[in-house]
Image (cartoon, rainbow, N blue to C red):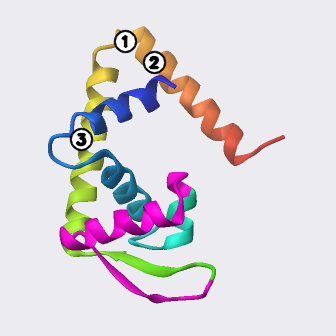
């Protein structure tokens, strides 16, 4: 929860630069390799299709993505990040990494070692569930 909150705080600090909904959408696109259909984006954002469509229209107007043709009647159009959108998503992720790095670096050595150990155990459990 703390790591998530730290990432969210880094994203919130971008509020004056990029609206929060666009930041979240950019991160969904980035995690998906740059292209997402409207239905999947709406589900990831827990938003309605109409709200997500409007968000995509605004992002297209800002030059951050291209809205393509409808891939199927259920999925809606496929949207793809432009090079500007890809660069902005990368910049946002860099801000998140910096915020996390600052947080970890503020910890004492024993706490940092415990965190590293705990995250290693968590990763192992996720990769090899019993």
Point 58% across, 78% down: residue: 75
For the residues labelled 3 and 1, the Cα–Cα distance comes to 23 Å
For the residues labelled 1 and 2, the Cα–Cα distance comes to 6 Å
Q: Foreground: 29 or 95?
A: 29
Q: Foreground: 44 or 94?
A: 44
Q: Which residues make up the magenta segment? A: 44-73
User: Is mark 1 in CB contact (under 8 Å) with mark 2?
Assistant: yes
Q: Mark 1 points at which residue?
A: 109
Across and down, in percent, residue 45 comes to 50, 53
Q: Which mark is residue 113?
A: 2
Point 32% across, 30% down: residue: 9
Across and down, in percent, residue 130 comes to 84, 40
Q: Name the residue under label 3.
A: 95
Using the rendered view, name the quadrant where residue 72 is placed: bottom right
Q: Foreground: 1 or 127?
A: 1
Q: Residue 26 carries which label?
A: none
């Amino acid at each position: 929860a703390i790591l998530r909150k730290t990432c969210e705080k880094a994203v919130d600090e971008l509020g004056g630069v990029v609206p929060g909904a666009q930041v979240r959408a950019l991160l969904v696109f980035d995690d998906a390799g740059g292209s997402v259909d409207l239905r999947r984006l709406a589900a990831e954002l827990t938003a309605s299709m109409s709200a997500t469509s409007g968000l995509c229209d605004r992002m297209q107007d800002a030059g951050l993505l291209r809205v393509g043709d409808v891939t199927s009647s259920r999925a809606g159009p496929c949207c793809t990040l432009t090079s500007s959108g890809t660069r902005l998503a990368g910049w946002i992720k860099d801000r998140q990494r910096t915020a996390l790095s600052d947080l970890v670096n503020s910890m004492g050595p024993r706490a940092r070692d415990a965190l590293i150990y705990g995250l290693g155990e968590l990763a192992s459990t996720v990769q090899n569930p019993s």
